[in-house]
Amino acid sequence: MAILVHCDYCGKPFYSKKHKLAARENGQQHSLCCSFKCACAIRLGRPVLARRRRVKLTCEMCGQEFEETAVHATYRRFCSIACKAEYQRIAFVGEGNTFYGRQHSEESRRQISANHFRWYGDENPNWRGGITELKILIRKSKQYKKWREAVYKRDRYCSVQSGKHGQTWELVAHHIKPFIEILREMLALYPHLSPETDATELFKIALNYEPLWDIGNGMTLLRQEHIDLHSIEDTNDDED
């Protein structure tokens, strides 16, 4: 709702919003002006606003003095997050803890336990059949590093998308056919082996599975280009 007021500089009547008038009354705003020109003129020599004025405080943890705005000084107690964390580590032990002397009921414990394990294993929507450990073994292997280096050398350490040259740490060997699809095809050939219990044996098989090491299935990209590509395809980087 607009209220008719008078400019504090030139006296010209104009309409202003109610919250601006209230801000002037409680000291958060010095004046109300009808134009930018009047506001600039009245700004010369005026005191600093309360929300910008800084005051000196003493940290309750380390005792060091620090500055804070007057508005935030009413509840600021520590000079840094580190001091706040150290205070909480000491103060919330024993009787200082709000849960001190209390215990969870058996029903509460069962609910906490059920919620904690709710997203584990095949109940998780991202569950892939327990192949994470096998996938890590392959990606950390020397053969995988050789495959990646061979892709870089073939592309002369340049992105096939932009043609820009990059250092090894700036590059990514992207799988044209996703790595996870190739791995699932390999697992389908050995249904009697489980990725969870037979990861070591499956890893040895993977080292001789030619589709995994096909250099033609790799392409060199800059790291940011790789991230952008997966964001467009709405896939995870681990599935490249």
Image (spheres, helix red, strand yellow):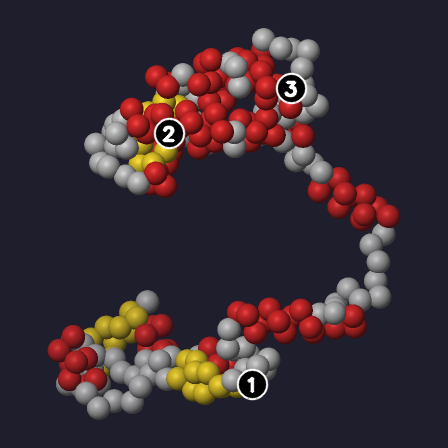
* Location of residue 203 by image quarter: top right
Q: Residues within 10 Å of mark 2 (few under 14, many from 20)?
A: some
Q: Is tag 1's residue or tag 2's residue first in the polypeptide sequence? A: 1
Q: Residues under labels 1 and 2: Cα distance?
A: 55 Å
Q: Which residue is mark 2?
A: 149
Q: Which mark is residue 63?
A: 1
Residue type at the position of mark 2 = Glu
Q: CA distance from mark 1 to mark 3?
A: 60 Å
Left/right of residue 168 with respect to residue 80 in the rendered view: left
| Residue plotted at (25% across, 89% down) | 46
Is the Cβ of the residue at disc 1 closer than 8 Å to that at disc 2?
Answer: no
Q: Residues within 10 Å of mark 3 (few under 14, many from 20)?
A: few
Amino acid type at circle 1 is Gly
Q: Are marks 2 and 3 in contact (CB under 8 Å)?
A: no
The numbered mark at residue 201 is 3
Q: Which of the two discs, 1 and 3, sits closer to the camera?
A: 3
Position in image of residue 174 (x %, y %): 37, 27
Question: What element does badge 3 sit on?
Answer: helix
